[in-house]
Amino acid sequence: ESERDVYLDGEAYFEVTKNRRCPFVVESEAMRIKVLGTTFNFKCDKSHKLAEATLIEGEIEVRGNHDEGMIILSPDIKSDKTYSGVLKKKDNIESVLQSLDNSIPINYKIVGDNIFISSRNK
């Protein structure tokens, strides 16, 4: 009754009932997601060193397990738009992210080996 914690190794789709006194928490090898009431998908693949959270509705707080940083995902990350293109091989990820930022309104933050990307309204 006092905790709603789940550990995930793989991929799962969640529809969480809102309960402000008892937040729902999903933990994985790479990150921790805290929700109050929302719908989202979470994928964690240790073998490929991949962790991915996809918000469908509501709001989630995504935090690295090793103090890499935190980002809040909220509605209106536009699902009706897709982007594609080709980037030349760059010297580092910072130059790739800067190229993306020049054409797509994004915010990004690099903390250690982790990159946090969110949309930015122009």
Image (tube, helix red, strand yellow):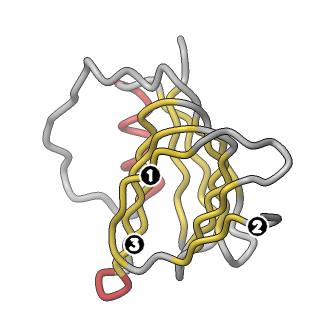
Q: Position of residue 103 (x, y in %)?
A: 35, 24
Q: Which mark is residue 14?
A: 1
Nearer to us in this view, 64 or 18: 18
Do residues under tags 3 and 2 come within 8 Å of each other at their CB atoms?
A: no
Callout 3 amino acid: Cys
Callout 1 amino acid: Phe
Nearer the N terminus, badge 1 or badge 3? 1
Nearer the N terminus, badge 2 or badge 1? 2
Query: Few, some or many C-alpha atoms within 10 Å of disc 1 (few <14, some 14-19, many ≥20)?
Result: some
The count of marks equals: 3
| 74 with respect to 42 (left or right) | right
Q: Position of residue 87 (x, y in %)?
A: 20, 46
In the image, residue 83 sits, relative to residue 122, either above or below, namely below
Q: Residue at x 59, y 58 (%)?
A: 110
Query: Few, some or many C-alpha atoms within 10 Å of disc 3 (few <14, some 14-19, many ≥20)?
Result: many
Observer-side mark, 1 or 3, equals 1
Do residues under tags 2 and 1 come within 8 Å of each other at their CB atoms?
A: no
Secondary structure, mark 2, is: loop
Q: Which mark is residue 44?
A: 3
Secondary structure, mark 3, is: strand
Secondary structure, mark 1, is: strand
| 94 with respect to 37 (left or right) | left
Q: Which mark is residue 3?
A: 2
Q: CA distance from mark 3 to mark 2?
A: 22 Å
Callout 2 amino acid: Glu
In the image, residue 82 sits, relative to residue 88, either above or below, namely above
Nearer to us in this view, 114 or 80: 80
Q: Residue at x 70, y 78 (%)?
A: 66
The quadrant in which the N terminus is found is bottom right
